[in-house]
Image (spheres, coloured by chain):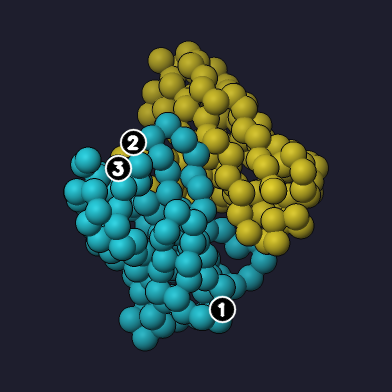
Amino acid sequence: AQSVSQHNHHVILSEAASLELGCNYSYGGTVNLFWYVQYPGQHLQLLLKYFSGDPLVKGIKGFEAEFIKSKFSFNLRKPSVQWSDTAEYFCAVNLNQAGTALIFGKGTTLSVSS
Amino acid sequence: GAVVSQHPSWVICKSGTSVKIECRSLDFQATTMFWYRQFPKQSLMLMATSNEGSKATYEQGVEKDKFLINHASLTLSTLTVTSAHPEDSSFYICSASGTGTNYGYTFGSGTRLTVV
């Protein structure tokens, strides 16, 4: 069965620091990869997704992620975080087939101090 | 863009009663809907997948007689928590996929269920 591992449970950074959140998945087939953000009290929002093509994916709000197939990884990065980036971040994966569910990692809480 | 409306946003019910949660796709046809459960400070756990007009497929460990899912139309899916107990208290989130989302996923805003 597919699974998604997020290694960092809680990350604390100061504003302007660089961010990298790890995500690994276990599935040998073709997958689609996603990063979602959940701000306090709000619903999930898609940051970026990878289906195919350029393994470096740029998303909203200055986030990017790199798909490294050999490492089964899809790490999220941002060069300079802001206080408003404080949120819960979820990595998710699904099979490359229409109608298959997203499987989520356990999430990483990011706290940014101003 | 694709929008999913989920109602109610929060509900408190007495133990032993049933609660229905609705998930509507407002501007696209949701051929597939997914129901998740999220405990505080934890991830979203997939409960079931439903395709319009078909019976839902439940994940292992999810009681299908307790969590009744109906997906009778391309714009509406419902989750009914039957004979609710305090341990059913959680955050329930629906997600829809289909034409209009380019087979991506659109999430509802979630329902906070508290069983007292």
Q: Amino acid at mark 1?
A: Ser
* Rendered residue at 56%/73% (across/down): A51
Vertical comparison of B82 with A29: above or below: above
Residue that numbered label 3 is attached to: A83
Helix, strand or loop for disc 3: helix
Q: Quadrant of residue B73?
A: top right
Same subunit: marks 3 and 2: no
Numbered label attached to residue B40 = 2
Vertical comparison of A107 with B17: above or below: below
Q: Amino acid at mark 2?
A: Pro
* Rendered residue at 41%/40% (across/down): A39
Q: Amino acid at mark 3?
A: Trp
* Rendered residue at 63%/70% (across/down): A97
Q: Residue furthest bottom?
A: A70
Residue that numbered label 1 is attached to: A52
Answer with left or right where residue B31 lies relative to residue B45.
right
The quadrant of the picture occupied by the N terminus of chain A is bottom left
* Rendered residue at 67%/66% (across/down): A98
Q: Position of residue A19 (x, y in %)?
A: 27, 60
Mark nearest the camera among 2 and 1 is 1
Circle 2: is it few (<14), some (14-19), or many (20+) Cα within 10 Å? few
Numbered label attached to residue B80 = none
Helix, strand or loop for disc 1: loop
- Colour assigned to chain A in the rendering is cyan
Vertical comparison of B113 with B77: above or below: above
Q: Are circles 3 and 2 on residues that touch, CB within 8 Å?
A: no
Q: Chain of mark 1?
A: A
Chain corresponding to yellow in the figure: B
Q: Chain of mark 3?
A: A
